[in-house]
Image (spheres, grey):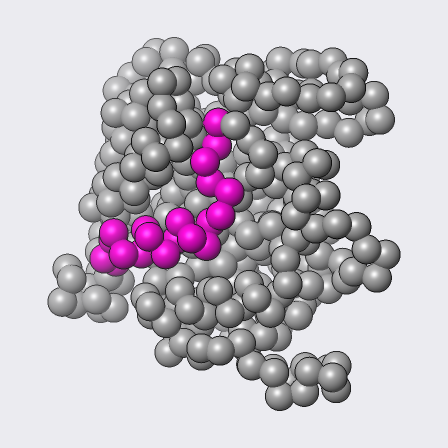
Amino acid sequence: MTIQLSVLDHSWITSGQDAAAAFARTIELAQRTEELGYSRFWVSEHHDTPNIAGSSPEVLISHLLAKTDRIRVGSGGIMLQHYSPYKVAENFNVLASLAPGRVDLGIGRAPGGLPRATAALSPYSPHAPSVDEKLEQLASHLKEAVPEDPSVAGLRAIPIPPSPPELYVLGSSESSGLLAAKLGLPYVFALIINEDVDAAARAFRLYRSNFRENAAGPRALLALSVIVGETDEEAQRLASENARIKFIFENGQTYTALSRQEAASLRFQGRYTTRSQPQQTVFGSKVSVRRKLLELQRDFGVEEFLVTTILEDFDARVRSYRLLMDAFPEAAESRTASAKAAYPKNV
């Protein structure tokens, strides 16, 4: 099975930076990873998080599409619980019309922030559809299916692009795998959120065994943290800089900061405790990381890795992505061949 490599970026606001600088780094990273041969570049959605600038992925995606030529650009992911499925379909149909064949729409089921941000984005309504129901509606809009609700008969998400955005289900649980299977959609398990490899194995197993028959068949992706250094020792040193800080509130809710810097920037009301835990990252030299990722591919049967590299030093981050692609030259060759077929004038 051929491996594809892709990138997930969070637009981190690192020490001494502002949001404008963070976005400039995201743009540069998209351009650099396109040159290296990565398949897709996804941006995340976070709200009320002081050191993450990416709160509006659809706006950022539009800019990234204009700044790149071939790489697919998408969301990892849109937090659908906050939004109208119809409006999301319209937004991404516009993007897919502006850049045909290059737009991905990854959908997340988590809130992407703490309760106060959730309340501000989508005030509670007992009659609101569930996230799963919204995802079914969104899939119907993108396929131009006839709505079941007679009150919106004939409704279309205009414009209709020549090539619709590719829809993905993102998750970190067995239920998300089952939902992706029910809808016949590609599935991304976020090992960067749920680091339980047994849970990932169960989710992929349920996804495949329950997948609704369609022409495309199941497609499994794994999102994970990777750091590649010139040597194993250097990669271990870089990886040791990362640690998750989990905030545990009195009501049982939790929030996990993905870096010590993010944790230091957060301010919460009420009482809470914190717990530090090492970031579960695949790290090492090119040889070591290639071996580890091939083991994960064998264990999970995934076709693609969606890689995030959390390093404050931007040059070290870019170098890690370069070394990772060096470790998988077949991934770059496969992507270049696909790009030549799809965009011959730009290659």
Report the residue at 32% width, 66% height from top. Answer: 99
Report the magenta residues as a range.
Answer: 51-70
Q: Where is residue 269 drawn, in percent x and y?
A: 73, 21
Seen from the viewer's position, the closer of residues 176 and 314 is: 314
Question: Residue 284 vs residue 108: left or right?
Answer: left
Please provide percent x and percent y for residue 95.
40, 65
Q: From the image, which quarter does the C terminus lie in?
A: bottom left
Task: Name the quadrant containing residue 289.
Answer: top left
Task: Kindly indicate the quadrant of the structure image that contains residue 185.
Answer: bottom right
Q: Nearer the viewer, residue 184 or 1?
A: 184
Can residue 31 be seen here? yes
Left or right of 171 in this view: 321: left
Q: Residue 252 at x, y = what percent?
A: 82, 26
State yes or no: residue 67 in magenta: yes
Count all numbered tags in the image, as a single digit: 0
The residue at the point 49 percent across, 48 percent down is: 56
Q: Is residue 324 magenta?
A: no
What residue is rendered at 58% in x and 38% in y?
47
Q: Is residue 293 visible?
A: no
- On the image, the x and y values in percent for residue 213 come to 61, 73
Note whether 43 is above or below 228 in the view shown.
below
Q: Is residue 216 above or below residue 170?
A: below
User: Where is 32 relative to 72, above or below?
Assistant: above
In depth, the one of 167 and 202 nearer the eye is: 167
Residue depicted at x 39% and y 18%: 15
Q: Is residue 46 above or below residue 59?
A: above
